[in-house]
Image (cartoon, rainbow, N blue to C red):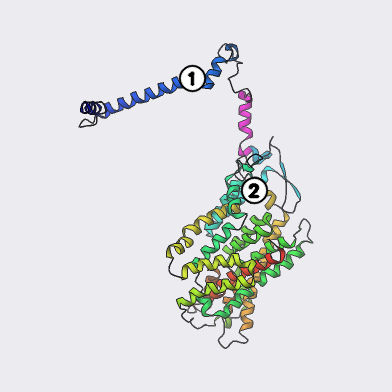
Amino acid sequence: MRKLRLNFLKEVFMIGNKKDPVYITKICMIIMIGVFAFTLISAAFTPRAQAQTAASVEDLPSFRNLDGIIPNSSNLPRVSLGSFLRNIAETTGIFAFINGAAEGGVPRTDTTPGGIPITIFGWMDLLMVAVGFLIVYLGAAKGFEPLLLIPIGFGTIFVNIPFANMGSPGVWNETLHIFEHQGFLNVIYNAGVGNEFFPLIIFIGIGAMTDFGPLIANPKTALLGAASQFGVFGTLFFVSVANFLPGVAFNLKEACAVSIIGGADGPTTIYIAAKLAPHLLATVAVAAYSYMALVPIIQPPIMKLLTTKEERLIRMKQLRPVSQKEKTIFPIVVFLLALFLIPSAAPLIGCLMFGNFLRECKVVDRLSDTAQNALMNIVSLFLSLGVGSQMTPEKFLNPSSLIIVIMGLIAFAIATATGILVAKFMNLFLKEKINPLIGSAGVSAVPMAARVSNKVGQEFDPGNFLLMHAMGPNVAGVIGTAIAAGVMIAVYGG
């Protein structure tokens, strides 16, 4: 009997030698029609169907009763053809950019980071969208930090699209104690940008990619990295002076967030801004990354202005080989010094040295590779989108933002100049002279600042290779900026 049933199934479903596609298609269609019929019959007995049946025939819509109400739709607004077309027109981007994106097509009101009321007109949102496309252009067409500026630009565009609510903070649910209906950019920002999560992960990746060998081989170049921090602390004074300008009011926490731009270290800038002045995060982050990208343009004129031709021609001896043991011990020693002397800087320096230890211990190559590549790329993407999500008119289109951009440039210029001047000062006491051009690499833009030092040196002597010598102050600048951030947090709180 069982054998007969199997043969019957084979014949019905063509499970055998027969493989007629037309017959199989007919069988599938019959099955689908049966399922559809079963679904219709089941739906007839659902509570909604029963409610419709129980309703009065006069209340239901029909050709005889065009004003009838469909059950469970009494609370929905009635939409005529005219109101439908009007709603479509009033929810277009063109209408919002002309009239404003608030309800009713009127300008909305908000406050600047300084607490000053501001009216946001539609053209301001359009201007920010244009700024976003400009940032994308600088990254994609000009090659200015494309891995960072392109996502920042798109984040800026996304958050300023009218009615899209991609940066919406959501609505607080008192029952569940959560924000509902948040925009995805707001989720990203709260997940890692508005706190210390993403910047610290970035520092782990930077540590895993950094070779501290040139600094270990020539420890005195650490002074050049430290000298560049004059740009950070010196700008505190200029930011304070800027408060005499109309419409500008920076407290010391905000001044710290602005002056740290001089270190040319994006993650550190975001880290300290998130702790001391979250409302300035977008502007200072974009300024920091922009100046990092503009290192080849900003630094050479300052380097040539402050050095003589003879100084640019100085050749430095080849660095001594650094053993693997030295490279492995170095991150542990630096982390212990930060732990005991500047604990407020320990998160940044600790993550940097943790990543470097993954690289140098040679027993966790998979973790090192992940930190350098996949993890670094993913977090950089989210970090940049989160920064772009803060580029809104009330935060960017005000006098304070212009001052931030100007002060960031001043900080960067001072950091470059002091590194060069300290190198010239050190040469007064050193038998083996330092080429002052490597002093400009004391900013944290790794390895771009070191490449610029090497390039300028080779303009005057093509055989003078300064890259590895410049990497010493360059990586020291990363540590120095982290220490500067830790000092600011220790003094002004976080």
- Taking the spot 68% from the left edge, 52% from the top edge, the residue there is 395
Instruction: Answer left or right for 218 relative to 230.
Output: left
- Magenta includes 92? yes
Instruction: Answer left or right for 428 relative to 456.
Output: right
- Taking the spot 41% from the left edge, 21% from the top edge, the residue there is 37
From the top left corner, tell me how far across and down residue 163 is, in percent. 62, 39
* Residue that carries the numbered disc 1 in the rendered image: 45
Single out the mark in the foreground, 2 or 1: 1
Q: Please, which residue is most extreme toward the front here? A: 1
From the top left corner, tell me how far across and down residue 16 is, in percent. 21, 32
For residue 344, which quarter of the picture? bottom right
* Residue that carries the numbered disc 2 in the rendered image: 127
Of 266 and 48, the residue lying toward us: 48
Please identify the quadrant where the C terminus is shown: bottom right
From the top left corner, tell me how far across and down residue 133 is, in percent. 58, 50
Task: Identify the element where label 1 is drawn.
Answer: loop
Q: Residues under labels 2 and 1: Cα distance?
A: 56 Å
Circle nearer the N terminus (2, 1): 1
